[in-house]
Image (cartoon, grey):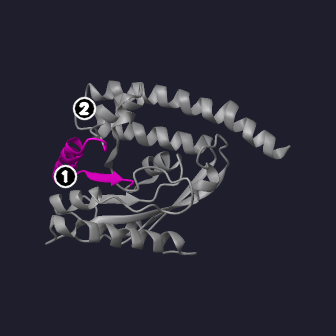
Amino acid sequence: MREFLSHARSVLIMIPWLIVATIAMGALSFVCSLFDSSGKLQHKVAVTWARMLLKVFLVKVDVIGAERLDPAQPYVFVSNHFSLIDTPLMFGNMPREFRIMARHGLWGIPFLGWHLNRAGHVPVNRENPREAHKSIGRAADKLREGYSILLFPEGGRTRVEVMRPFKAGAAYIAIAAGVPIVPMAIVGTRSILAPSSTHLRPGRAELRVGDPVPTEGLKNRDAKELIAGVQQEIQRIWESPSWR
């Protein structure tokens, strides 16, 4: 009975709230974009949206390791991705303003797509190599302007709790802009919202921030080795029973 009531709460309260909040905050973000072309106001709207959702979903998040970051330094943040709840977790708890790189199809979704486009996030068309290459250049430009970039380099959520090989785009971006990559691990979200599930369960998650990995002196030929090392570090951070 308890499981049934929990699932009913997800379907009848939490998911409708997600839809309503996304429409309302997406519209607000669009209005803000008429007065602010930098995306800063839109980012604040996104942070508010994410924190509202996490509160309604009864999800608490601990951020561990944020002190490793230099407040004056833009970064390429990369993380594992096991659940749809990862996105609001990141927007609500990242210790830095950022722009995301994500699949271009999201830009076609009403309200959400409006926000992504007007806030300066970067779409990626993985089916078109030429467009994907241009996206790397646009992301590097964002970093040069002082904005950090966030990617889920597995290319999407994994259906099993095993990381897929990371794509090298994050490494190419970091090398092009000459900024460090920060390995991050999200822990606990799969038990809150599993893939292909509509059952949102209250719970606690962690966002673990690793040590920045420098890219000075690296060339494009080093990108695959760099991203492989970053993935190993994220795996280590994610598996640690009490990481600090």
Q: In this view, does 117 lie above or below 129?
A: above
Q: Give the range drawn in magenta.
A: 126-152
Q: What residue type is labelled 2?
A: Asp
Q: In this view, does 26 lie above or below 172?
A: above
Residue at image x 25%, y 32%?
36
Residue 30, position as x, y percentages in the image: 34, 26
| Observer-nearest of 179 and 166 | 166
Q: Distance between the residues labelled 1 and 2?
A: 22 Å
Residue 51, position as x, y percentages in the image: 51, 44
Quarter location, residue 54: top right
Kind of element beneath mark 1: helix
Residue at image x 33%, y 46%?
100
**Residue located beneath label 1 in the image:** 140
Can residue 140 be found in the magenta stretch?
yes
**Residue located beneath label 2 in the image:** 36
Q: Which of marks 1 and 2 is in front?
A: 1
